Image (tube, rainbow, N blue to C red):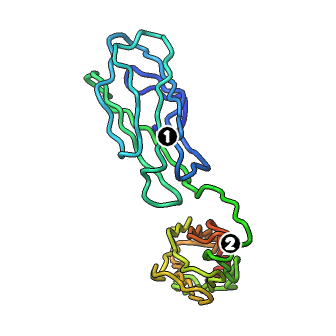
Amino acid sequence: MYVFGQVQVGGIFFEKMYFYQDTLHENSIKKFDVHISAKTENIRFTRYEAPDYIRIDLPADYLQKEKKYSVPLYVSAQRIKKLGHFQTLVKLYTNEEKDNEKILYVSGIVRPVPKKYTPQELATLPQIQVKPIENNIGKVKKGMVVPVSFVIENTGNAPLSILNVKTECGCTQWQTDTTAILPQKTRKLTFLVDTHDINLIHSEIWLWTNAANAPELKLLITGQIKE
C-alpha cells in the first residue's frame, strides 16, 4: 500500500516511496533523494533498517511542521554480491505512537562496468555466443512443464563463468550448473517452463557472465498455450 508516491504515513508525507535505478555499475554509488515533510509537530526519526549496501542520513533533529526535507539514501553497488536485479525494503522508524514504521522500496539492476579491449586483449579473454537468443517453443498444452534449452559457447581463450541468471517470470526455473565453460566448449542452458498458471509463454531471461564481448545478455522464451 506504500509503493507509489504522494503517500502520508502517520505524520510524515512522502513524495514517493518507491525508488528504481535501471543501471547501477558494479563499482558505483547511487544517491536517491527521499523528499518528505512533517504534517504534525514533534516527529523525529529514531533509526532505519536496511541491507549493508544501503545507507541513509536521517535528520538528527525534530522535523519542523510543513517544512520540506530531502533525506539522502545511498546504494553502494560494490556491496551487492551479484550482478543483476536487486530489490529490498528499507524501514524508517519515528518516535510516533502510531504508524511509526515507514517502508521504502528500493530496486534496480547492477551491471558490469563497460570496458573496451584491444584485439590483443580480447583474444586472451572469455567470449560468449548463445543460440538461439529467442526460443519459440510453439504450442504447448496447458499444465505441462516444458524443458527449453539454449546452447552457450565459449568462443574465447579463457574459462567462461556464469555469474548470475534472472528469470522475469516465476513460471521459468533455471536447471543448469554454474561450473566454468572451458575455451571452445559448449553447454546447454536448460530452463523448465511451468504452464499451469499462465495463458501465454513470454519469459525474459537475463544472463550475466565474465565474457568480454557481451557480459550481459537477454534471452527470450515464447510460445502459445492450448487447452
The answer to whether 20 is drawn above or below residue 115 in the figure is: above
User: Neighbour class for label 2 at 10 Å: few (<14), some, many (≥20)?
Assistant: some
| Residue at the image position 68 percent from the left and 77 percent from the top | 123
Apparent side of residue 40 relative to residue 209 in the rendered image (left or right) = left
The answer to whether 175 is drawn above or below residue 11 in the figure is: below
Element marked by disc 2 = helix
Q: Hey, what amino acid is under mark 2?
A: Leu
Which is nearer the eye, 14 or 180? 180
Residue topped by disc 1 = 3
- Whether label 1 touches label 2, CB < 8 Å: no
Q: Position of residue 40 (x, y in %)?
A: 39, 12
| Mark linked to residue 136 | none
Q: Position of residue 177 (x, y in %)?
A: 45, 82
Quarter of the figure with residue 208: bottom right
Q: Earlier in the sequence, mark 1 or mark 2?
A: 1
The answer to whether 90 is drawn above or below residue 161 in the figure is: above
Quarter of the figure with residue 225: bottom right
Distance, label 1 to label 2, CA atoms, is: 44 Å
- Front of the two marks 1 and 2: 2
The answer to whether 165 is drawn above or below residue 179 in the figure is: above
Which is nearer the eye, 24 or 46? 24
Apparent side of residue 220 relative to residue 92 in the rendered image (left or right) = right
Q: Quadrant of the C terminus?
A: bottom right
Q: Position of residue 108 (x, y in %)?
A: 54, 50
| Mark linked to residue 122 | 2
| Residue at the image position 51 percent from the left and 79 percent from the top | 194
User: Neighbour class for label 1 at 10 Å: few (<14), some, many (≥20)?
Assistant: some
Element marked by disc 1 = loop
Q: Hey, what amino acid is under mark 1?
A: Val
